[in-house]
Image (tube, grey):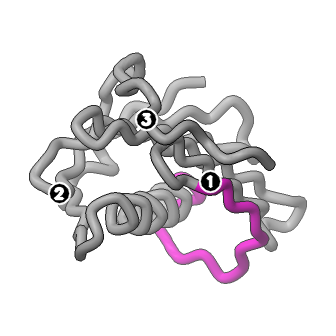
Amino acid sequence: MSPLPSSPPAPTDVEPVLYAAAADERVAIRLNTPDPEVVVITSVMPRLSLRLKSTHLSLLGGSPVLVSHLPTCAGGEAIQREATGMVGRSFEHCCLLDHLAELQHSIERLTDGPAPVTLADDALEQLPVYD
């Protein structure tokens, strides 16, 4: 796989439907469910020129979940793996928590420091899901 450009343009075309906070910036997050077994989540941080797109595909029976994370930022590397034992109130909730963990890792790689990602307690109830 070829490396990503060192300075991608600032991503701005994701309609923010949910916000998290990380690295002193609001993170726009959009969750799509094109199918009951598929969840696609995109987060955008313009200041860091970071966009993270995560896809979660649930196999029959729910486990394992095939996961891919694609960060478009300087030094970003695509990650693909199988996840088992994901914990959450729903499949979407599990996927969002997994996405936020990868977002935190991406921010830490860009900023060379800790980057906790915070989400309001009631954010999941407010999150619109687009089919």
Does the rendering let one see residue 51?
Answer: yes
Residue at 31 percent across and 29 percent down: it is 17
Q: At numbered mark 3, what does the secondary structure look like: helix, strand or loop?
A: loop
Kind of residue at badge 2: Ala
| Image quarter of the C terminus | top right
Residue 89 or residue 63, whichever sits in front = 63
Question: How crowded is the residue under tag 1: few (<14 C-alpha within 10 Å), some, or many (20+)?
Answer: many
Image coords of residue 34 (percent x, y): 69, 29
Give the camera-side residue of 84 and 82.
Answer: 82
Q: Is residue 85 magenta?
A: yes
Q: Which residue is mark 3?
A: 7
Residue at 48% x, 64% y is: 102
Q: Which residues are magenta?
A: 77-92
Q: In the visual, does 19 lie left or right of 93? A: left
Indicate the position of residue 57 as horizontal and vertical percent values: 76, 52
Q: Do callouts 3 and 1 mark residues in contact (Cβ within 8 Å)?
A: no
Mark 1 in CB contact with mark 2 (< 8 angstroms): no
Which class describes the residues within 10 Å of circle 3: few (<14), some (14-19), or many (20+)? few
From mark 2 to mark 3, how far is it between C-alphas? 19 Å
* Residue of label 2: 23
**Distance of label 3 from label 1 (alpha carbons):** 19 Å
Residue, far left: 24
Q: How many marks?
A: 3
- Asked if residue 125 is positioned above or below residue 83 in the image, the reply reads above
Secondary structure of the residue carrying numbered label 1: strand
In this view, the mark in front (3 or 1):
3
Q: Label 1 belongs to which residue?
A: 69
Tell me the kind of residue under disc 3.
Ser
